[in-house]
Image (cartoon, rainbow, N blue to C red):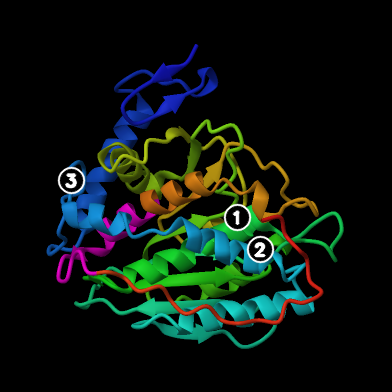
Amino acid sequence: MERDSAHWNYTRRHARAPGGPLYVLLLAGVAVLLAAAPAAATGTPGGEYDPGIAAMLAEIDESELRDTTHDLQNFSTRAYGTDGNREAGAYLSARLAAIPGLEVKSMDGELNNIVATLPGSVEASDGVVMVGAHYDSTSTDLTRAPGATDNGCGVAIVLELARVMSGHSFNRTVQFAFWNAEEVGRLGSIDYAADAAVPVALYLNYDSSCYDPLNRSVLDIVYDERSAGIAALMADHNTLYGTNFALTENIHSCTSDHISFRERGYPAVTTHCEEHGPAHTPDDTVDRVSLGYAKRNAQLGLSVLAEVAGFRDEGAGAAIPKAPMAVWDLSGRLDGAD
């Protein structure tokens, strides 16, 4: 037995009656989110369609997602501690630095987290909005760890969000993060979250969020009580902006980088595809990525980030230039399927 609603599709083991504990929790979460949202936000959380946000979602470019994922898989391996991992970090720093309006900082030391900041238009006392993904990979053969679905495409989504959002204004500061060493225990995000310079109003994570070979459009939203309002907002926006996923909730208990922020008391959500597919194998190449699914996942996240950050519609509709691609000598590296 499957139960469908405008917001959530539950399998039998996740079914709940209307007005049950989850429904009440989501409504309460939306109330908290409304209270915390910047006063000058263009849209109204909880159901108001914002044409400015809709226009921004249309700027997400599927070819950008593919090209970045292809580049990342072609380092052959991004396993933590390898040359490929270090080179991938340098590549991502260069890509972010090429986007106008971002302030990019690569953390020194072994972990080499990379964080780019888009300054807000007002000082928000309740923190920054952050979106991130881990860029390291793993495999049964560490010399061949292309990591396209886990997690090159997640990185590509965050980079594309940075490109698009940098062409717009927001009340809150927005940060775009690439974490290292997730596959060996979330070392990068744990280190960052422990010493975050300012509070985090929302952390949105992309990990294993681009694989849908049967076109089922199932997307799992992984959240807890602190982030129930964000989960509810994602459910609203899934209908409002036509991303039209069949949403599930907390099917996956993955310990990705959102946990590092959750453990520090920050609202944190991750999106996850229905299954892992080729993850952690040499077959995890760009031809296994579901690009249309990835684009819609990026759009859903962007709508929520824009709402929580307080989207301002100055210059709405202006074309967002593509960031220049960094040129890397990848000769002799993995040749991904085209």
Q: Could you give the CA–CA distance between mark 1 and mark 3, rounded to whole angstroms?
A: 31 Å
Q: Nearer the viewer, mark 1 or mark 3?
A: 3
Residues packed near mark 1 inside 10 Å, few (<14), some (14 to 19) or many (20 plus): some
Is label 1 in a helix, a strand or a loop? loop
Give whichever of discs 1 and 2 has the lower sequence position.
2
The amino acid on which the numbered mark 2 sits, given as a three-letter code, is: Glu
What residue does disc 1 label? 256
Query: For residue 267, which quarter of the picture?
Result: bottom left
Left or right for 251, reference 186: left
Across and down, in percent, residue 158 comes to 47, 64
Marks 1 and 2: CB-CB under 8 Å?
yes
Left or right for 26, reference 218: left
Is label 2 in a helix, a strand or a loop? helix
Marks 1 and 3: CB-CB under 8 Å?
no
Give whichever of discs 1 and 3 has the lower sequence position.
3
Residue placed most toward the observer, 128 or 224 = 128
Queried whether the magenta region covers residue 302, the answer comes back as yes
The amino acid on which the numbered mark 3 sits, given as a three-letter code, is: Tyr
15 shown above or below 250: above
Residue placed most toward the observer, 334 or 2 = 334
Residues packed near mark 2 inside 10 Å, few (<14), some (14 to 19) or many (20 plus): many
The residue at the point 73 percent across, 76 percent down is 330
Residue 257 in view: no
What residue does disc 3 label? 49
215 shown above or below 190: above
The residue at the point 35 percent across, 44 percent down is 234
The amino acid on which the numbered mark 1 sits, given as a three-letter code, is: Ser
What residue does disc 2 label? 182
Marks 3 and 2: CB-CB under 8 Å?
no
- Residue range of the region highlighted in magenta in the rendering: 301-318
Residue placed most toward the observer, 289 or 118 = 289
Instruction: Say the numbered circle drawn on residue 244.
Output: none
